[in-house]
Image (tube, rainbow, N blue to C red):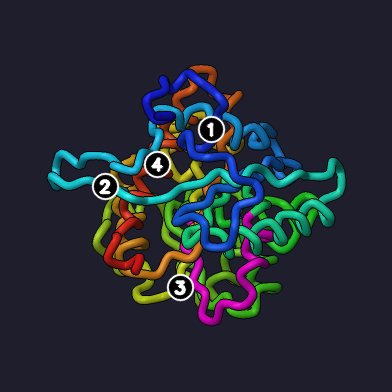
Amino acid sequence: MRHHELPSTGPATFFKAPHRPDADRGEAHIGVLGVPFDEGASSRPGARFGPMALRDASGRYALSSEGFYDLEAGVMRLAGARLVDVGDVDPIQNAVTETFDRVTSAARRLRTVARLPVFVGGDHSVSFPVLRAYDDVPDLHVVQLDAHLGFSDVRRGSRFTGATAFRRATEEVPGLKRITALGLRELNSGREAVDKARARGHALLTARRVREDLEGALAEIPERAAVYLSIDVDVLDPAVLPGTSDPEPDGLGYAHVMRLIDAVVGRNRLIGLDLVELAPHLDPTGRSAQVAARLLMDTFALWWDPARMV
Ligand code: MN
């Protein structure tokens, strides 16, 4: 009767799911892996503590086999969904190449374990080694919810930071066809990165564009594609989620972000998902981790459709 335990009881796993680092092939519908690495952060580190904080915070949303009752739709959400916590990647300090290799191999393995592999960072640099594990997918679409473009070639002397992750991914993931980035509003994207991304056909939508023309923004989201969704928590306004390395003012509200995710998940085949840049110590109230846990569970509920699972 583990799901009768109070949220404050341990051991802490993602959503109080079974801890299954050696999970078998096809064992879970949803498998969650921690990627506690933030050496790609250029200003304020701390996202390495994201997975542990999210495990702690997610105790409120322990997933039982009955799921959650949706009071608007009058149905159970996530009934029968099997979720496992497959543990963490084990980073090697000051060895980004070796650490990224470990991330890629852990991601490849998680793809065999779970129908929906979920990666909890970590700073945004980890999206690149995760995406390398999708090198067998033709016509891969990436939807990136983020205040920052992440398409620089080199930033502050490094080719492997959060600011360069999607540039590296387009170079090294042969099937990566298109990126749709929504929520952009940083000062430091740089013209070269913006021009390069647009020249490759990627869609770049600012936070203001999403707010002022939501239907137009939704129309930019792909349809009937294999989609990898990268959720940088800084897409949310810092008033909603302050615990992140590079907060930018004038971000999106929770409802807007969920509308975007609803369109991504509802129209496409979601083949992977990351949530990055949660730096819990930058928010002493703890609400950032709470919001991030809720965001993940709401995303799972939108994705889960028993009819699609047969
Ligand atoms: Mn960002």
Q: Which of marks 3 and 2 is nearer the N terminus?
A: 2
Of residues 165 and 24, the one nearer the viewer is 24
Q: Earlier in the sequence, mark 3 or mark 1?
A: 1
Q: How crowded is mark 4: few (under 14 residues within 10 Å), some or many (20 or more)?
A: some
Judge left or right: residue 257 versus residue 75.
right
Q: How far apart are marks 3 and 2 (CA)?
A: 23 Å
Q: Nearer the viewer, mark 3 or mark 1?
A: 1
Judge left or right: residue 241 versus residue 4.
right
Q: Identify residue type, mark 1.
A: Arg
| Label 4 secondary element | helix
Judge left or right: residue 20 versus residue 105.
left
Expressed as whole percent of the image width and height from the top left, the position of residue 297 reads: 39, 43
Do the CB atoms of the residues marked 1 and 4 lie less than 8 Å apart?
no
Judge left or right: residue 147 versus residue 196.
left
Do the CB atoms of the residues marked 2 and 1 lie less than 8 Å apart?
no
Q: Residues within 10 Å of mark 2 (few under 14, many from 20)?
A: many
Chain part drawn in magenta: 127-144
Q: Nearer the viewer, mark 1 or mark 4?
A: 1
In this figure, which residue is indicated by the disc labeled 1?
A: 55
The quadrant holding residue 217 is bottom left
Do the CB atoms of the residues marked 3 and 2 lie less than 8 Å apart?
no
Expressed as whole percent of the image width and height from the top left, the position of residue 204 reads: 46, 64
